[in-house]
Image (tube, helix red, strand yellow):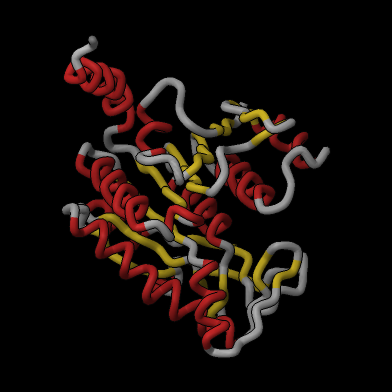
Amino acid sequence: MTNPVFRKEDVLIEALPYIQQFEGKTFVIKYGGAVMEEEQLKSMVAQDVTLLRKIGIDVVVVHGGGKEITSLSQKLNIETKFVNGQRYTNEETRDVVQMVLAGSINKDIVRRINIHGGRAVGISGIDAELVTVKKYEKDDLGLVGEVIDVKTTLIKNLLRDGYLPVIAPIGVDESGTVYNVNADIAAGSIAGALEAAKLVYMTDIEGVKANNDLIPHLTKEDAERFIKDETIKGGMIPKVESALDAIDKGVQKVHIVDGRIPHALLLEIFTKEGVGTEIVGE
């Protein structure tokens, strides 16, 4: 029988070159979906991002919270409406979005990371005009913003001082009006502005699939073709499009992983096989 201590040792040895490669680099983690609902998974993500920080990787977390927004909207008798898979945001809904994302969810994530010594700080795109937006024009989504600029000074200062920024995806336009921002797009824009080594989307599915088979490695050219021929469709489209945009802006690699797998974040980054889909430029 194989000694379990040796199995653990093998895991550590396999991880070592990745740890050496990424020390001092920046990772942006988009945190959302089912992984935000189960207590055990929430604890594991808090542990994982804290571990990344402790081994010398600069970690930035951008989170969603769609189900919580819908739940509070229902309690307040505010209608929930979606257009092409994206939430329509009127003024009432925008206020709920701000309360949930910049309030309860953001602070719960911060609290969980800090339990493990992660020194997390909760902010939103409003703080220091971090995320500047204009009204989304492709569809009429109300107060939904399209990111036009990310000011990275605040994030870089927090990282330099040893903190782990946790960012709620809301932004402001030039007049100061607050807008809801798709969390996938916000994460991609922030990762691009930081020229992050990795952008990781934690989702509710295994990764990008073709004919029900997981695609572990995807080039930018293939991803664009799969969107065009509808191999990639639905809610995966904004994830992949924001991934491609982030790569165009300087992100080295994007990962789409199934956050329901325990410690999926570490498995994808620190093992040869990984557990999801990685997207690269060429």
At 40% from the left and 63% from the top, the residue drawn is: 167
Between residue 142 and residue 276, name the one nearer to us. 276
At 36% from the left and 50% from the top, the residue drawn is: 41
Tell me where residue 80 appears, x and y as whole percent: 65, 78
Is residue 244 something that shows in the picture? yes
Tell me where residue 96 appears, x and y as whole percent: 51, 82
Position of 26 compared to 278: left or right?
left
Position of 120 compared to 92: left or right?
left
Q: Is residue 196 above or below residue 134?
A: above
Position of 182 compared to 46: left or right?
right
Query: Which quarter of the rendering shows the C terminus?
Result: top right
Number of disc labels: 0
At 52% from the left and 76% from the top, the residue drawn is: 71
Q: Is residue 281 above or below residue 245?
A: above
Between residue 197 and residue 228, name the one nearer to us. 228
Q: Quadrant of residue 164?
A: bottom left
Between residue 72 and residue 148, name the one nearer to us. 72
Query: Which quarter of the rendering shows the N terminus?
Result: top left
Is residue 161 something that shows in the picture? no
Q: Is residue 4 above or below residue 58?
A: above
Q: Residue furthest right?
A: 229
Q: Residue furthest front?
A: 1
Tell me where residue 31 appears, x and y as whole percent: 44, 54
At 16% from the left and 53% from the top, the residue drawn is: 117
